[in-house]
Amino acid sequence: MSRHQAVRNLDLEEVLDESYGYEDEDHDMSAEDRTLLAEGTIQVKSALGVAVSKVTTAQIEEALWHYYFDVDKSVAYLVSKFIAPAPKATKPPQKANDACDLPAFCQPVKSEPRQSFAHFFQDMPWGGGPANPPKTSKLAQIAAERKRKLEEKKAQEEAEPRRNVLAEKPRDTNSDFMSSSWSSRLEAEAGKTTTDSAAKKKPLSTDAISDNVKALKLAESPVPKSKNWDVLSEFENSQRKKSASFVVVGHVDAGKMAVNKLDTVGWSMERFNEIKDQITGFLTAKTMGFQNKNIVFVPVSGLHGDNLVRKPSSLAASWYTGSTLVEELEKSEPSARALAKPLRMTISEVFRTTQSAVSISGRIDSGSLQMGDALLVQPSGEKAYVKSLQVDEQPADWAVAGQNLVIHLSNIDVIYVRVGDIVCDVKQPIDCRHTFTLKALAFEFLMPMQVDVHRGRLHSAGRIDDILAQLDKATGAVTKKKPRVVKPGNTVRLIIKLISKVPLEAGQRVILRSGGQTVAAGLLE
């Protein structure tokens, strides 16, 4: 028999009896005890007399055994227990309506008049009422006073917009771009479509190159804006010249120059012509190679809105017979849309919205997309799907090349999406490479050296690995092979090597920087 069956068939009572050395209580009683028990039973019955019928023999034997065969104690126990038990004492009934007889914890609580929350918390630091102001700490008082001053300042600026516009801001805080679309309003007025435009307010700063290149990339028609009194002195600054160089190298051939604040000099035609001649001479020089027919200067007054949409009403501006700034922008020929090419879009911003955990914005360089399409984000190589679209801040079902839009993505983590990445077609993805050829215009002396490569919002470290040739600006022919050093203003063909793979294609605009200065800019070949 197996062990578990033996355990299951084990008699526990038998084991316990053997372990503790006893079996039944009858076997513990000796012959002498039996004799004493029998004699004691007869004596108890005779002592009880008639009342013996109220007890049993077993109860008598149990009492004798308990009191060690003492007849008197056994009789007293049986009488008090079974024959004539003492009556139980009963408590007197309590008066239910007499509250004074109840214990203190059982007495009803006296109701008090209710207090308002404001009155109850009036002594708290954050409390108070309409009559008494709340008690606050010193830091809370300072924060409240600061908030009050900001609200007063904002209300004053809204009440006096002219004074706010006239206030000059520091140079660093005013170096930015404005980009907008003129099509929606002008379609209603003139019934035709325009292209996106960008108004440049200041020269490119050394610490905001990627943001400025982004604005130029999102716009088809740059509109540089210059103050009339300091344009000549500021234009001599090399950084302003590089700003104009970015426009030329980027193959933007329709630049509209808005000369602002001519109302401050009484709409002086002499001052306007002086600015026009100075900038035209620079742009049409051999260094830049800008075509004179594509340069248009428009005098404007942004404060009064003169010559922006409507002709100036001042008699001092009667000498200007040209078009307004918006009319000049309407004359620009829209660039050809690469609708048949594979989808390419550079991510300008990555953010989170209520519609999606990952939302991106940018401009479609080529191709098209619609809701539900599968996209590939390079260089991470992660796949995502279009959840919804917004074109010009309006919901849309599809978008094509040349449009600025917001895409709400799904099925992708935000760690795989960065500013500067390329959104492309899954079937025809863009290649990622760490070496490319660049046809560039040199702004500084170039030689094999470390550089920072900027393509749109993308930034990557690299180096000029080799200088293949120096080119003619007009024809593109090779004028010198393998130059050791390239002087500023020359066009060269470079080999750039990056430290990591970056999504790049031929025709994209690239800027090279080194030591905080822009050294070259050009197009990929």
Image (spheres, grey):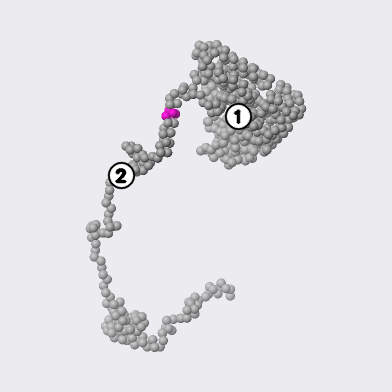
Residue 286 — which label? none
Pick whichever, 483 or 307, lies toward us. Answer: 483
Q: CA distance from mark 1 to mark 2?
A: 65 Å
Identify the residue shown where x is 53% and y is 18%.
261
| Relative image position of residue 307 (x, y in whole percent) | 53, 17
Residue holding disc 2: 115
On the image, which quarter does residue 273 sit in?
Answer: top right
Identify the image quadrant of the C terminus.
Answer: top right
Pick whichever, 146 or 224, lies toward us. Answer: 146
| Relative image position of residue 192 (x, y in whole percent) | 56, 21
Amino acid type at mark 1: Thr
Identify the residue shown where x is 71% and y is 32%.
448
The secondary element bearing badge 2 is classed as loop
Residue 206 — which label? 1
Pick whichever, 448 or 34, lies toward us. Answer: 448
The secondary element bearing badge 1 is classed as loop
What's drawn in magenta, residue-wise? 151-155
